[in-house]
Amino acid sequence: MQRSFTTLYHRHQRLINPSLGLVIIGWQYRIPTKPTPQHPRCAASTSSDISPQTGGPGDPKTPPSGSTPLSKPFSPSTPGPSPSPNQRSSNRPSELPPDWDENPDYSIQAFTDLPSTNFGTNQHIVIDNEFKEALRQILWRFRAPIRYAFAYGSGVFPQTALKPPISSALHPHPNPAISAVQGGTGKMIDFIFGVSYTQHWHSLNIHQHRDHYSAVGSLGSSLVSSIQEKWGAGVYFNPYVTVNGTLIKYGVVNLDTLCRDLSQWDTLYLAGRLQKPVKILRDDPRVRLANQVNLISAVRTALLLLPSKFTEHDLYRTIAGISYLGDPRMSLGAENLNKVGNIVKHQLPNFRRLYAPLIENLPNVSFHDPRCSSPTWVDDPDTDSTLVQDMDPTKRGNMVRRLPINFRKKLYFRYQSKFQIPELEFQKMMEQSNDEDSSRVRRKQGGAFEQRVAGDEQISLNREVSAVLTDIIKWPSYSQSVKGIITSGFGRSWRYLREKWEKNREGRR
């Protein structure tokens, strides 16, 4: 049975979807007849650990002692913008230029080409400094050039309460900072590496780290890169490998594939991961721009599914749950059923840092809670602030018009069938909303059709949006899982599956 964001309204009661941990909220459309008292608009600090002495964020100027340097510096080593001390401590976001996401230029080469100073620094989640350096040291063990990299998952951001530190058998000889942060028995750390030339990267990496690959590696980098790019979501994973005494899993993706998924939601495989807190270790201006589009698209999608008044938990659970619709791990019992709720519960301040600056710059939504005027609000995990959004049909139609193109087209086709719009009329409408003509600059303003979509009965809208998201995610996730058996080998794949089943059992207890 297909999971959906189906919502019901009954005196603002909240129900919990037991399979995803999503907050399910219902509502009726109510446009205020008089202004409501306004509280100061609040947003998280735009702080990041971008150092003016380094290259791009997360790119050390020199490798740590004992590490293997890269063959040559990469272009994102151009210094990125660094927040000033007063910006780091402020709870005000940096202003974004109006309509910065109207026609973003994904061909940019430097951080100075981004739309504004400090653009996208909300993506740089602050973690323990020694832990961050331990993660960076792992990157320096790869000679093949990594242009963009982030660490993610429960090995970096806890999803449950930490257990007292004990001697870990998982990591052979981990950096003490990793043991201190993870506690308990330790967890495998997940990485994604963005690279420019897939086959060349694998050629270099197979030569250096042949033991990271299954038998497929012996067939050469050409076959490895073909498997990566033609199957699944365009990612090649090497799990359960030890680097710097730490057990890790890393996925390799071409930067073009990554940027396309972030900006268009082709598969939501990586875009969905980056909609949750991650630790960016090496940055790239193109990816930062595309990811900012991804994040604001996640907010707009969630707003379509939420009432006029909701809480931070409602918003972040809706966003975090997007990428799990259609994920075969959820239906096969290979994932903790409380995963979405656990992620938000234990990472609320980081979600706030990631999304509050974007919310602050959107014209139709704002924080409406006196508690968020407190200087400690950003880091307070116990405050569940209230937000309000404008339910004006024009503004909601504009949100539909600005959804990622792949997602939007699929949603349009579903509503063409539902509204029984003639084919010729529909094709004319699609041509008018075409974003791919680089010779014209278009304002993404929603028309009558988009307003009709946004104004659909809420249960129906949630069902249609859920169906589209499932359609985007299901096949790439399934084929990526099947591909993992080949690329990882049967032994590693079986180990991974057993651990996921254990997580599912833990979630049922």
Image: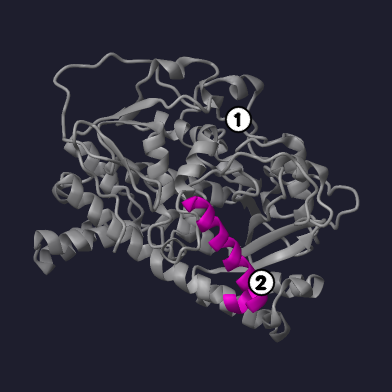
Magenta residues?
485-509
> On residue 47, which mark appears?
1
Q: Please say whether residue 451 is visible from this viewpoint.
A: no
**Residue 53: quarter of image:** top right
* Magenta stretch secondary structure, dominant: helix
Q: Quadrant of the N terminus?
A: bottom left
Nearest the eye: 485 or 388: 485
Q: Amino acid at mark 2?
A: Arg
Mark 2 and mark 1 residues within 8 Å of each other at the beta carbon: no
**Helix, strand or loop at disc 1?**
loop
Q: Please say whether residue 352 is visible from this viewpoint.
A: yes
Residue under the image location 46 percent in, 16 percent down = 373
Residue 348: horizontal and vertical position, in percent? Answer: 50, 34
Nearest the eye: 58 or 237: 237
Residue 432: horizontal and vertical position, in percent? Answer: 22, 57
* Residue position marked by numbered label 2 in the rendering: 492
Against 287, residue 384 (above or below) is above
Q: Is residue 503 magenta?
A: yes
Residue under the image location 90 percent in, 53 percent down = 66
Q: Residue furthest bottom?
A: 219
Q: Residue furthest front?
A: 509
Residue 149: horizontal and vertical position, in percent? Answer: 65, 53
